[in-house]
Image: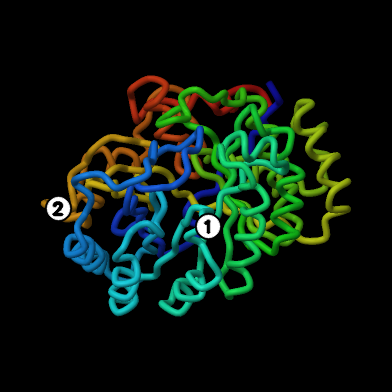
Amino acid sequence: MGRVTRLAPAGSAERPGLDLDSRPILVFWESTKACLLSCRHCRASAIPHGLPGELTPSEGLTFVETLTGFGRPRPVLIVTGGDVLMRPDLDRLIGSARELAVPVAVSPSVTPLLTAERAAELRGLGVKVASISLDGASAAIHEGIRQVEGHFANTLEAIRLLRRQGLTVQVNTVVMRENAEELAQVARLVKETGASIWEVFFLIKTGRGTGMEELSPAENEDVCHFLVDASRYGFTVRTVEGPFFRRVVAARKEEPGADPAARFGLGPLYRRLAEELRRELGEPGDTPKAQTKGTRDGKGIVFVAHDGEIHPAGFLPLSLGNVKRDSIVDVYREHPLLRDIRAARFSGRCGVCEFADLCGGSRARAFAASGDPLGEDPACAYVPGAPA
């Protein structure tokens, strides 16, 4: 395991006025299970058609309207799936959100439905951000995960297509044993295609992802340090279910000139990725663009499933209520589990960690590993109280 430097934790005080007890930053809506793909790690276990119980067009409009109850600034509504483009009333929903000043981002699948014309229509409706999944830097790896021949080239073209239509593009990549060695080349593709954000998902064994292999905690530490390096090439780097990245970002800020491998006792995966990153993109020229918001599942984030069930996050399938009968505003603000999550009332290492607020561990991974959403995150290498 790599050596983890001790330092004073940073927290949400970096963003004064951000009241995550009252309103989330992001509301994710799994608008449909329908998708033409069948990806091996899919959280949603998407299928070619929608399921009974999905929010009807009128229920969808009502749900969008309830988001105004959070006040201003409105949370951003991230419309996902399945494939959001298979939701037939998508344009009407986006139009309603625009009238209510609810910002909307979309997460389409790369299928024949994603055309230049469709992207232009979404941009005309006011959508400014779209995310596209890219899970490898080669057809062999990406298509091995996505299970569609030709999908790698189509994905790169989809990113460029969205950029040409004026959308900000976020590239989503799931990190797992299968693709870890290609991360530096993926970073090059993020740069070359003009994407603005690289959002890296640390695998949670849920949905179809239960059969895929996670990295070890030490390797996660290596990847986090690599991601700090990657954020120096002009695009923002964020993580999902890898909140320990924020601790690493804070450590690197403390000693910006240090050699990460030597200072933090990093392993061979970091060394390989760091060397490959420089071969691919040269020496970095920008200061890091690494997100450090102290959000986590249920803190600044809430998820609504296809059938209206409210969860702390998409990878944490614990029902807190249903938007068909419950106020999402009241659920977010008052549900005991979410209040415990936001208060960092954790057990195990996460419960005694000085980074409990800044990081807090992945609540979804804690639940997947132990059945306790307030337990410790087994993917984190940090040991509170260990020598520096």
Q: Is residue 301 above or below residue 356?
A: below
User: Can residue 244 be seen from the camera position used here?
Assistant: no
Q: Identify which residue, 183 or 2, lies in the foreground.
A: 183
Q: What kind of residue is marked 1?
A: Ser
- The front one of 336 and 303 is 303
Q: Is residue 271 above or below residue 321?
A: above
Q: Secondary structure at mark 2?
A: loop
Give the position of the N terminus as an image quadrant.
top right
Q: Position of residue 220 (x, y in %)?
A: 63, 31
| Screen quadrant of the C terminus | top right
Residue neighbourhood size for the residue with mark 2, other residues' Cα within 10 Å, grouped as few (<14), some (14–19), many (≥20) = some
**Number of the label disc, if any, that sits on residue 293:** none
The residue sitting at 69% across, 45% down in the picture is: 227
Residue shown at 45% from the left, 72% from the top: 122
Check disc 2 and give the amino acid type: Lys
Question: Where on the picture, by quarter, is residue 219?
Answer: top right
Which numbered circle lies on residue 324? 2
Q: Can residue 187 be seen?
A: yes
Q: Which residue is mark 1?
A: 131
The quarter of the displayed image where residue 381 is located = top right
The coloring applied to the image is rainbow
Position of 298 relative to 160 (above/below): above
Label 2 to label 1: alpha-carbon separation: 27 Å
Identified at 57% across, 58% down, the residue is 170
